[in-house]
Image: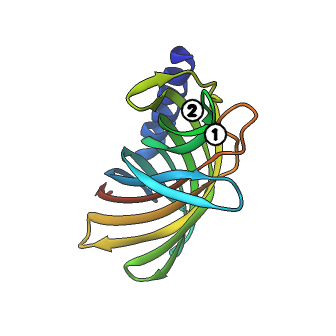
Amino acid sequence: MTKRILLIIFLVLGVCVRNFAQNKHSFSVKAGINFTGFHTGSSTYTGEFGVNAGILYEYRLSSFISLQPEMVFSQKGGEYKTPGNEWYVYATSKLNYIDIPLMVKIKILENINFQVGPQIGLLLSGKTEYEGKEIGTETNFLDFAVNGGFGFDVFQKFFIQTRYSYGLSELFKDKNYKNSVISLSVGYKFMR
């Protein structure tokens, strides 16, 4: 599993570096925090915190539309109900992913843009605890989501991003829990 993840990372980095030398391209780094939880389709609870950090590659199609693939380490997690000894208990899961979103970035105003697109997440590790003790869970390796949010350019090279990621994939076998993440990030653009 680790070899597959490393191969994907090197392929994406290779494409980004090769195309970076051409016009209409930029490369950025970002880091921030996640407000994370699980949704079941009918309710959402976002009460855990995590971090995010990654790289962005932007290809400008026109003066107001860009494609922006990203590769982001993202900590997610939340509470879910699981059978206990005599009744149901609420356990807390912490999940680490490499997320690969493909965002369409649409300039609304000079310094404000709207971003929307699909995302695939690759699970790196996960742990579920109840009262300080780790309990076994079967977590799916792939996590599909749809993202939407806004970016704000601050000065020429700095930006702020806020985004909501709505999970489409069930995380645990036979349980209807999906990721729900609000992220806030700051970043730096390496301009051409």
* Residue 14 image offset from top left, x and y in percent: 47, 31
Q: Is disc 2 placed on a helix, strand or loop?
A: strand
Farthest bottom residue in view:
109
Q: Quadrant of the C terminus?
A: bottom left
* Residue 103 image offset from top left, x and y in percent: 57, 58
Asked if one can make out residue 72 in the rendered structure from this viewpoint, the answer is no
Farthest right residue in view:
174
In the depicted structure, whether residue 189 falls above or below residue 160: above
In the depicted structure, whether residue 154 falls above or below residue 70: below
Q: Which mark is residue 69?
A: none
In the depicted structure, whether residue 136 falls above or below residue 19: above
Farthest left residue in view:
155
Viewer-proximal residue, 134 or 70?
A: 134
Q: Quadrant of the N terminus?
A: top right
Residue at x 51%, y 35% (from the top left corner): 12
The type of residue carrying mark 2 is Leu
The type of residue carrying mark 1 is Asp
Q: How many marks?
A: 2
* Residue 21 image offset from top left, x and y in percent: 40, 45
Q: Which residue is mark 1?
A: 143
Q: Quadrant of residue 62?
A: bottom right
Viewer-proximal residue, 83 or 105?
A: 83
User: 10 Å neighbourhood of mark 1: few (<14), some, or many (≥20)?
Assistant: many
Farthest front residue in view:
86
Asked if one can make out residue 33 in the rendered structure from this viewpoint, the answer is yes
Q: Which residue is mark 2?
A: 122
In three-dimensional space, the C-alpha distance between marks 1 and 2, rounded to whole angstroms, equals 7 Å
In the depicted structure, whether residue 44 falls above or below residue 38: below
Q: Are marks 1 and 2 in contact (CB under 8 Å)?
A: yes
Q: Is disc 1 placed on a helix, strand or loop?
A: strand
Residue at x 30%, y 57% (from the top left corner): 187
* Residue 63 image offset from top left, x and y in percent: 50, 74
